[in-house]
Image (cartoon, rainbow, N blue to C red):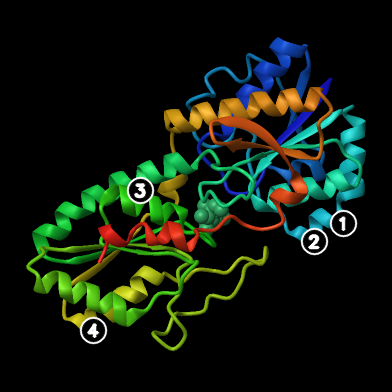
Amino acid sequence: MRIGILTGGGDCPGLNAVIRSVVRSASAHYGSAVIGFRDGWRGLLEDRTTPLDVTAVDGLLTRGGTTLGSARVAPERLRSGVPSMKGVLAAHGIDVLVPIGGEGTLTAAHLLSQAGVPVVGIPKTIDNDIDGTDLTFGFDTAVSIATDLIDRLHTTAESHQRVLLVEVMGRHAGWIALHAGLASGAHLTLVPEEPFDVDEVVRIVCERFDRGDSHVIGVVAEGAVPLPGHMPLRDGGTDEFGHRRFTGVAQQLGAELERRTGKEVRATVLGHVQRGGTPTSFDRVLATRFGLHATIAAHEGRHGQMVALRGTEIDLVPLADAVARLKTVTPSRLAETGAFTG
Ligand code: F6P
């Protein structure tokens, strides 16, 4: 069998571990060949490939990023490109395509699957917002990095009796904010799923200082928004992929808090550091298991599916179900922070 593989969307720690896993398991268990498409769907649209053998994936387990390169491609280009992608796959004799990516990549995978291409998807995103899987690899690494950095902010905030707002990634889902906030003992967690009440944030900050606390740490997901009419938030419009352009919610909330509380406030944006570098051991294992089970599914003809973590086991879920909605933070998960914040 010949397997085609590509990594799409924003990169994420563990991508290289998956590529290695697919290549090694395809070779060891089935004697199959793996061909990589460069820069995500763009490489498939433009017919840019690289052969991947066991030697080529040597040392990839621990390396961040993706050796295949990645890119975002506008949904319209993907939709209109289906016939030419099918042509490229046929020309390379690809029997099954294994796209690794987040919502956009898996939606494109579903599109190709509906067009008759045998596909097995692998979910990845530091945001952990893919439905149908308990976790995506990259998330644990991002939370570990954010937690480590927030731990450091506690000490400097304490020294200066400041409010420190830490902006973490999380476009539509606040999983990184929720987990990094819990892990680092943040006093405030704001997520995109629940527009925040600025009066409430002001109250929490004032009460903490009134009680004699030395500082306040707030974790703010980049996609968090205030309740309508509470505070102006600059509109950055949308980019060519239809994504909202963020304008720095932590910075803007910080200015509002400083004005209303008289306390010194600093905002720290963690940004792409959350996506860089080597994956945690948890993500290496999850990525390796996803790669192995995707390879098995490809050879067993279980196509149009995505590998998923359910409890401790790796399962398959239909791509159609996985892309039907995003997995966002539930009110009950958010309520769990109640005893530890405020
Ligand atoms: O989807 C993953 C993610 O890291 C989001 O959390 C973030 O909003 C986005 O990618 C950033 O994208 P880019 O690297 O294209 O700026």
Query: Which residue is the extreme one toward the bottom?
Result: 229
- Type of amino acid under label 4: Arg
Mark 3, Cα crowd under 10 Å, few <14 / some 14-19 / many 20+, is many
Residue 270, above or below 197: above
The residue drawn where x is 85% and y is 35% is: 118
Q: Which residue corresponds to mark 1? A: 80
Q: Residues within 10 Å of mark 1 (few under 14, many from 20)?
A: few
In terms of image quadrants, where is residue 101? top right
Image height of 18 relative to 151, above or below: above
The residue pinned by badge 3 equals 146
Give the mark nearer the N terminus: 1 vs 4.
1
Closer mark to the observer between disc 1 and disc 4: 4
Question: Could you tell me which secondary element the residue under label 1 belongs to?
Answer: helix
Residue pictured at 87% horizontal, 47% vertical? 114
Residue at 50% across, 28% down: 284
Disc sitting over residue 76 in the figure: 2
How far is disc 2 from disc 3 in space, using C-alphas? 34 Å
Residue drawn at (63%, 14%), measured in percent from left and top? Answer: 55
Q: Are marks 3 and 1 in contact (CB under 8 Å)?
A: no
Q: Can see residue 255?
A: no
Q: CA distance from mark 4 to mark 2?
A: 44 Å
Q: Answer yes or no: is residue 331 visible.
A: yes
**First along the sequence among labels 2 and 3:** 2
Determine whether the residue tagged by mark 4 lies in a helix, strand or loop: helix
Indicate which disc, 4 or 3, sits on the residue closer to the N terminus.
Answer: 3
